[in-house]
């Protein structure tokens, strides 16, 4: 959305764009352990999938791997694309859109909270902590549909790690 605001100094028009902010989330899944959920250190407080904002010049795939590593200390290999979630009210802070991936931890025993995560742990999909924030409960329900064979994952574009 485009709008024009006026410069307080010269009165000239400045075009300002209000667009959704790109984010990414990762369902780190281990069939024996469940999914990785983090307890958020910052507002909104609660439990969430590991994820965060995509940096300028960064692919969403690289951002997903980076955010997973920053919040969980895990090296993650992305195995599929679950979907894009963009409901305007999905994040109470601002309008975001999230590209959500599924991945697996290369060394699941290395799980440790970091960055914006106060805690990180594997949880069974049948015993998730509460409250789950954002629209992550809906995302996890969609993932249950994948595990039940009623929905499939899309291919993930290869990315460079760094």
Image (cartoon, rainbow, N blue to C red):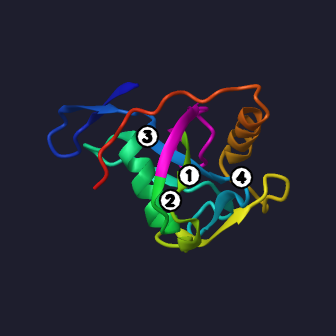
| 23 and 160: which is toward the camera | 160
Percent of width and height locating residue 48: 64, 56
Q: Is residue 34 left or right of residue 159?
A: right
C-alpha distance separating marks 4 and 3? 32 Å
Binning the other alpha carbons within 10 Å of mark 2 as few (below 14), some (14 to 19) or many (20 upward) gives few
Precedes in sequence: disc 2 or disc 3: 3
- In front of the other: label 1 or label 3? 1
Q: Report which residue position mark 1 lands on.
A: 104
> Quadrant where the N terminus lies?
top left
Binning the other alpha carbons within 10 Å of mark 1 as few (below 14), some (14 to 19) or many (20 upward) gives many
- Element type at marker 1? strand
Magenta stretch? 77-100
Mark 1 and 2 residues: CB-CB less than 8 Å, in contact? yes
- Element type at marker 4? loop
Binning the other alpha carbons within 10 Å of mark 3 as few (below 14), some (14 to 19) or many (20 upward) gives few
Binning the other alpha carbons within 10 Å of mark 4 as few (below 14), some (14 to 19) or many (20 upward) gives few
| 60 and 19: which is toward the camera | 60
Precedes in sequence: disc 4 or disc 3: 3
Can residue 142 be seen here? The reply is: yes
Percent of width and height locating residue 84: 55, 31
Q: Quadrant for residue 33, please give it.
A: bottom right
Mark 1 and 4 residues: CB-CB less than 8 Å, in contact? no
Mark 1 and 3 residues: CB-CB less than 8 Å, in contact? no
Q: Is residue 40 left or right of residue 144?
A: left
Which residue corresponds to the image point at 58% horizontal and 65% vertical from the top-left? 108
Q: Report which residue position mark 4 lands on.
A: 31
């Amino acid at each position: 959305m485009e709008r024009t605001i006026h410069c307080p100094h010269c009165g000239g028009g400045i075009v300002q764009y209000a667009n959704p902010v790109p984010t990414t989330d990762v369902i780190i899944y281990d069939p024996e352990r469940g999914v990785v959920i983090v307890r958020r250190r910052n507002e909104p407080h609660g439990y969430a999938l590991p994820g965060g904002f995509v940096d300028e010049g960064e692919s969403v795939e690289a951002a997903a791997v980076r955010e997973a590593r920053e919040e969980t200390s895990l090296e993650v290999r992305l195995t599929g694309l679950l979907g894009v979630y963009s409901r305007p009210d999905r994040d109470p802070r601002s309008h975001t859109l999230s590209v959500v991936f599924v991945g697996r931890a290369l060394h699941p025993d290395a799980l440790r909270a970091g960055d914006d995560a106060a805690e990180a742990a594997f949880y069974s999909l049948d015993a998730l902590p509460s409250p789950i924030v954002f629209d992550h409960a809906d995302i996890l329900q969609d993932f249950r549909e994948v595990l039940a064979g009623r929905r499939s994952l899309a291919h993930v574009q290869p990315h460079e790690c760094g």
